[in-house]
């Protein structure tokens, strides 16, 4: 199953993707009015009962929004593919390294990525993101995947010069509308082997990143266990698992995103996240 958050006629809704259509959830189950309620423990089971219905909307008639609830936090992992660590000239971290992104830094599928006026160094980073489905705190690695509600694609757009302004890179990671996430969340039960997914990023149709999640330095169970040892993770929280080698900043010459570029992040069994780039309006 796939659940999406979308806008139509000025109203924001949640729905299940079925073929080329969408089944709106709120008319049939008022308890599934936000996306974190669907990915929570009982949500998918309740939503599955509605999959027998015919779609009431066409995908082409809605605007996909980031699949984030207002309560969700987005935790991103840095340097989690060895080839990416190598291309940056760094050493692999002794522990997973996390930083946070704001909701405002993301757009949804086919919404526009903004290259900020203050920089010409907007870069792409294709990633697998997991969505927490059950409250978890200090969870053992062996049980960590039991707490995942679903998966989605993420482009962690990074403004590289501003990233260097702080030790955590936070300033370069949180420009408004600089990254994207979506197009939907796929139920964890439909992704039985998240450690074997093929990830590729395409820029104007050319493959610029290609890897398998089997190459992660810290796998999904380790990331969940480590982060939950620090804080209590809640349904709807998102962990972006890191980007592979091939980022634009490490190419010769560097390949920065420009207005008119189109970025696609494809993950097997999850979907394709597609966004065009424009310059920030004056």
Image (cartoon, rainbow, N blue to C red):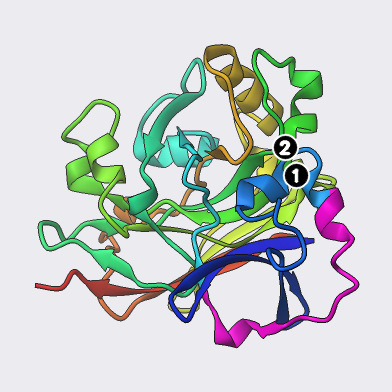
Give the alpha-carbon distance from disc 2 to disc 1, as whole Å: 11 Å
| Image location (x, y in percent) of residue 232 | 57, 20
Splitting the image into 4 quarters, where does residue 255 fall? bottom left
| Badge 2: residue crowd in 10 Å (few <14, some 14–19, many ≥20) | many
Q: Which residue is mark 2?
A: 148
Q: Residue at x 58, y 61 (%)?
A: 200
Specify whether residue 58 is painted magenta.
Answer: yes
| Label 2 residue SS | strand
Specify whether residue 93 is painted magenta.
Answer: no
Splitting the image into 4 quarters, where does residue 234 fall? top right
| Image: magenta residue range | 45-63
For residue 5, say whether it is visible.
yes
Q: Which mark is residue 38?
A: none
Q: Residue at x 57, y 66 (%)?
A: 13
- Tell which circle, 2 or 1, labels the residue nearer the N-terminal end: 2
Q: Nearer the viewer, residue 10 or 18?
A: 10
| Image location (x, y in percent) of residue 54 | 83, 81
| Badge 1: residue crowd in 10 Å (few <14, some 14–19, many ≥20) | many
| Label 1 residue SS | helix
Left or right side of 116 for 250: right
Q: Which residue is mark 1?
A: 194
Q: Residue at x 37, y 29 (%)?
A: 90
Q: Nearer the viewer, residue 146 or 86?
A: 146
| Image location (x, y in percent) of residue 132 | 65, 37
Splitting the image into 4 quarters, where does residue 26 fall? bottom right
**Which quarter of the rendering shows the N terminus?**
bottom right
Of labels 2 and 1, the one closer to you: 2
271 w.r.t. 95: above or below:
below
- Residues under numbered marks 2 and 1 in contact, where contact means CB atoms less than 8 Å apart: yes
Q: Residue at x 82, y 45 (%)?
A: 193
């Amino acid at each position: 199953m796939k659940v999406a958050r979308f806008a139509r006629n000025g109203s924001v809704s949640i729905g299940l993707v079925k073929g080329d259509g969408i089944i709106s959830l709120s008319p049939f189950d008022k308890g599934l009015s936000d996306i974190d309620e669907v990915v929570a423990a009982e949500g998918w089971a309740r939503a599955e009962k509605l999959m027998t219905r015919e779609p009431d909307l066409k995908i082409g008639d809605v605007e996909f929004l980031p699949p984030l609830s207002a309560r969700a936090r987005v935790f991103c992992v840095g340097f989690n593919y060895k080839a990416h660590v190598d291309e940056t000239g760094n050493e692999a971290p002794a522990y997973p390294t996390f930083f946070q992104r704001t909701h405002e830094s993301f757009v949804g599928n086919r919404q526009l990525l903004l290259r900020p006026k203050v920089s010409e160094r907007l870069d792409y980073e294709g990633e697998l993101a997991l969505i927490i489905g059950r409250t978890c705190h200090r969870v053992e690695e062996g049980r960590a995947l039991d707490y995942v509600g679903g998966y989605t694609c993420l482009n962690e757009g990074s403004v590289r010069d501003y990233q260097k302004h702080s030790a955590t890179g936070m300033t370069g990671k949180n420009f408004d509308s600089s990254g994207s996430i979506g197009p939907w969340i796929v139920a964890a039960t439909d992704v039985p082997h998240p450690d074997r997914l093929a990830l590729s990023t395409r820029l104007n149709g050319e493959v610029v990143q290609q890897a398998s999640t089997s190459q992660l330095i810290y796998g999904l169970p380790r990331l969940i266990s480590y982060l939950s040892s620090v804080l209590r993770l809640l349904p709807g929280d998102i962990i972006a698992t890191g980007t592979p080698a091939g980022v634009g900043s490490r190419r010769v010459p560097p390949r920065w995103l420009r207005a008119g570029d189109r970025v696609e992040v494809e993950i097997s069994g999850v979907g394709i996240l597609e966004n065009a780039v424009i310059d920030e309006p004056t």
